[in-house]
Amino acid sequence: MKRRPGADALLDAALATLQEDLLPTLTGRQKFLAAMIARAVSVARQDIAGAHESAQAERNSLARLYGQPSDDDLATLRKQLATDIRARKFKPGTPDENKLIDHLVETTAAELRITNTKYLAQRQRGRGAESAV
């Protein structure tokens, strides 16, 4: 029995076809739109590849923030964090606030690594607190 290609293989083939065969033949707006599609497919592919790893890293970061691991799913943990931020649980100038900032910078940097690698690389070379991420 012949196995069907997986999602990664299908995305790789679609992206290669788009970039190598179609994009060079297009001009103007069609080329621009095809380039946007290629970028979207590339981001989706990276997101799929890193989804489990990224989710586990975020869960670990939340465990450090709260001082304990949780069996809740990531969506529930994010909702709890949003509720705690709105309730001002992380008082300014406290270690809890520092942990919150660390968590937010870490998770934002992880998202940037997937969706906007050029921006993150520029910030790492430049200035600002997030340049150390």
Image (cartoon, helix red, strand yellow):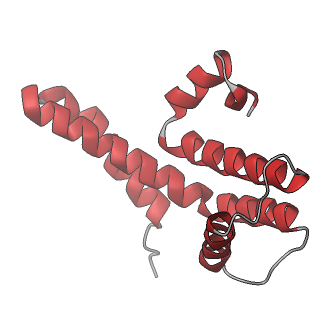
- Report x, y in % for residue 55: 67, 64
| Residue at x-position 77% and y-position 47% | 102
Q: Is residue 27 visible?
A: no
Which of the 4 image quarters holds residue 59? bottom right
Q: Nearer the viewer, residue 18 or 106?
A: 106
Q: Nearer the viewer, residue 116 or 87?
A: 87
Q: How many marks?
A: 0
- Report x, y in % for residue 37: 27, 45
- Can you say whether 15 is above or below 66 in the image? above
| Residue at x-position 79% and y-position 56% | 91
| Residue at x-position 71% and y-position 46% | 106
Q: In this image, 18 relative to 66: left or right? A: left
- Report x, y in % for residue 34: 20, 39
- Can you say whether 41 is above or below 120 in the image? below
Which of the 4 image quarters holds residue 63? bottom right
Q: In this image, 107 relative to 30: left or right? A: right
Image quadrant containing the C terminus:
top right
Q: Nearer the viewer, residue 41 or 21?
A: 41
Q: Is residue 86 visible?
A: yes
Q: Nearer the viewer, residue 87 or 116?
A: 87
